[in-house]
């Protein structure tokens, strides 16, 4: 992060300035979750994917649906698609999605499974996961009696049938699809369609957050999808802030979202809480609620004088209205020095604000 200036193009390639794109996510890595997915391990398994049952124990906790998805772009599955399309159609989300509901039901019937609408809806009662419905189908049957990869096919078929029969009550796999589709559409760069999808994800998460889940990592134990909730909430913050630049609707919804984060997850890491408060302050100021927004930032400086976030974000808001005060804040943070002075972009900010002060003095 320190090698990229705040006003330089973001290295992610979005075309936006770094400070308006990935800076906040990079700041969050200072408090990275210990439960974040192990990237190297995931990449290795994706390159050489066994069936979903074989992945258990090789990765951080992850639902079978996510495990199957993980390997779909691997060379092994590309070869399978060419050499054995029938197996590919039974083992991939894309393959099963290409089958009609009638074909799905017929194949399940061949496996001795009743997948009629009425039977499926009854089996799904009380469940959150479509894959768990498939476990009920196969429960107690010896694996040797099942066709090869029957567990994967049954699980993927159950996910497809849930989407067909119960769209008004999304399964956790449908929610994971919404999350991943948001990333495919641009993710944290914040086009409105991403925020619309991710707002549905957030509504689902809120409905299922128990009172005992007091930090975001605890929600991951319930969710166990392709992306951790801890990481995704940070990306949704970026998406909302970017979307709010041109649309006041997303400013208001972003304020709502950040208030809910702070209320629901009071036991988050303190650094994460501070950044969430700072993001809330920015959105409040953008919405015209400047007194409350600045009040939050000044409170961050007072409550956490050894952390940069309050100084830096307040200086960002003051640099055009009162650049002398903004510069004084930044110099105070640098000279203190705050604990994260080397990773906070303070020197870049000081240079920017000094230029503004110089322009006004000339």
Image (cartoon, helix red, strand yellow):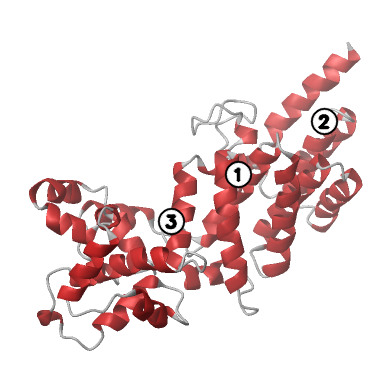
Where is residue 68? Give x, y as percent: 29, 61
Q: To which residue does mark 1 refer?
A: 239
Dot 2: element: loop
Residue 208: percent from the left, percent from the top? Answer: 58, 73
Q: Which of marks 1 and 2 is nearer the N terminus?
A: 1
Please tell me in which quadrant of the rendered image residue 137 appears: bottom left
Q: In which quarter of the image is the N terminus?
A: top right
Q: Tell me residue 25's x, y (percent).
A: 58, 46
Circle 1 SS class: helix
User: Circle 1: is it few (<14), some (14-19), or many (20+) Cα within 10 Å?
Assistant: many
Residue 22 visible in the shown view: no
Task: Name the residue located 76 percent from the left edge and 45 percent from the top edge.
Answer: 283
Q: Dot 3 corresponds to which residue?
A: 177
Front residue (pair 38, 63)? 63
User: Which residue occupies the extreme left position in the image?
Assistant: 83
- Using the numbered discs, state the Cα–Cα distance from disc 1 to disc 3 in whole angstroms: 17 Å
Q: Which residue is drawn at 82% across and 49% down?
A: 297
Q: Which mark is residue 319?
A: 2
């Amino acid at each position: 992060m320190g090698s990229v200036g705040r006003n330089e193009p973001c290295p992610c390639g979005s075309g936006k300035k770094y400070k308006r794109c990935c800076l906040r996510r990079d700041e969050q890595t200072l408090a990275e979750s210990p439960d974040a997915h192990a990237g190297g391990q995931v990449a290795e398994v994706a390159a050489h994917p066994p069936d979903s049952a074989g992945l258990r124990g090789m990765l951080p906790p992850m639902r079978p649906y996510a495990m199957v998805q993980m390997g779909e772009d691997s060379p092994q599955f590309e070869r399978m698609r060419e050499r054995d399309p029938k197996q590919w159609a039974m083992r991939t989300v894309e393959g099963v999605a290409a089958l009609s509901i009638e074909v799905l039901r017929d194949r399940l019937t061949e496996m001795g499974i009743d997948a009629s609408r009425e039977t499926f809806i009854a089996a799904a009662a009380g469940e959150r996961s479509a894959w768990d419905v498939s476990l009920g189908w196969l429960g107690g049957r010896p694996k040797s009696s099942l066709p090869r990869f029957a567990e994967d096919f049954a699980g993927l078929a159950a996910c497809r049938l849930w989407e067909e029969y119960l769209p008004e009550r999304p399964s956790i796999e449908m929610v994971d699809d919404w999350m991943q589709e948001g990333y495919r559409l641009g993710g944290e760069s914040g086009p409105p369609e991403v925020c619309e999808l991710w707002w549905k994800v957030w509504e689902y998460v809120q409905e299922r957050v128990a009172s005992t889940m007091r930090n975001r990592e605890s929600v991951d134990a319930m969710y166990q999808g392709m992306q951790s909730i801890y990481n995704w909430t940070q990306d949704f913050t970026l998406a909302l802030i970017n979307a709010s630049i041109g649309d006041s609707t997303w400013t208001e919804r972003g304020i709502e979202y950040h208030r809910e984060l702070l209320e629901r997850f009071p036991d988050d890491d303190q650094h994460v809480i501070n950044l969430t408060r700072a993001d809330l302050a920015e959105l409040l100021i953008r919405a015209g609620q400047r007194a409350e927004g600045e009040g939050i930032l000044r409170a961050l400086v007072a409550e956490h004088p050894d952390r940069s976030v309050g100084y830096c974000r307040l200086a960002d808001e003051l640099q055009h209205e009162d650049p002398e005060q903004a510069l004084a804040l930044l110099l105070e943070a640098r000279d203190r020095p705050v604990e994260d002075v080397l990773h906070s972009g303070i020197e870049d900010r000081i240079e920017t604000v000094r230029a503004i002060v110089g322009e006004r003095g000339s």
